[in-house]
Image (spheres, rainbow, N blue to C red):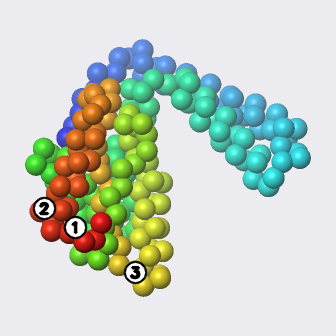
Amino acid sequence: MSSSTIKQKKLVDTLSVAEKVDVVLAYTSILGNAFFSLLTGIWRTRNAKRGSYRRHVLLTAVRTMVRRLSTRQILYVNPNTDNAYETVCKQRGVEPLSETLEDGTQAHWIGEKGAKKVMLNFHGGGFALPASPEAVEYMFKVVDGAEKEGKSLAVLFLSYDLSPSVVYPRQLEQAAALLNHVVQTLNNIQSL
């Protein structure tokens, strides 16, 4: 278990009963706003491009979620990066393989460890949100696309510590540690 997972679990464990009940109320609000946008979206998107209606509804739900839930509550309802990686590996029938850095941070392999090129992935989320299973799946698709073109590519997906349990610039320290690990320990400077 990576340092990120442990810290996220500790943070989520401190959620009060009121905050947990508020998650249910927030989801009611999210669903209500999404339903309302289903109705209003018909008029808003009738002259727009194809797919705009669906996008309107999804973005309404995301805006409501970000506005309504605290960072701690979002961490409570979402899997951590390590779990997202393991879930996608299980769905794809791939054996999970990770590198553990000196400080306990983990980076997860997507593709073959011995690939000619290694891409370092630092997922989005503003150093506060874990990677989603969709973000991990996307990187698997990037590797699959490279393989279809005959290119040897692997991705190291960093599972960095999340705020508010740790503060910036910890995440940049972890990113630098991963780069050093690839260059010095894996001796893979040519592949970056």
Question: Position of 77 compared to 120: left or right?
Answer: right
Q: Which label belongs to residue 184? A: 2
Quick check: 164 left or right of 31? Answer: left
| SS assignment at label 2 | helix
Identify the residue under disc 1: 189
Residue at 68% from the left image edge and 28% from the top image edge: 32
Residue flagged by tag 2: what amino acid is it? Gln
Q: Give the residue at x 21% y 37%.
A: 6
Q: Position of residue 86 (x, y in %)?
A: 32, 56
Residue that appears at 43% across and 62% down:
139
Residue 28 visible in the picture:
no
User: Could you tell me which secondary element the residue under label 1 belongs to?
Assistant: helix
25 vs 94, left or right, is right
Q: Where's residue 88, x and y in %? A: 39, 59
* Circle 2 residues within 10 Å: few <14, some 14–19, many ≥20: few
**Quadrant holding the C terminus:** bottom left
The nearer-to-camera label among 1 and 3 is 1
Q: Amino acid at mark 3?
A: Lys
Position above or below: 55 against 11: below
Q: Circle 3 is placed at which residue position? A: 151
Looking at the image, is mark 2 or mark 3 earlier in the sequence?
3
Sequence-earlier tag: 1 or 2? 2
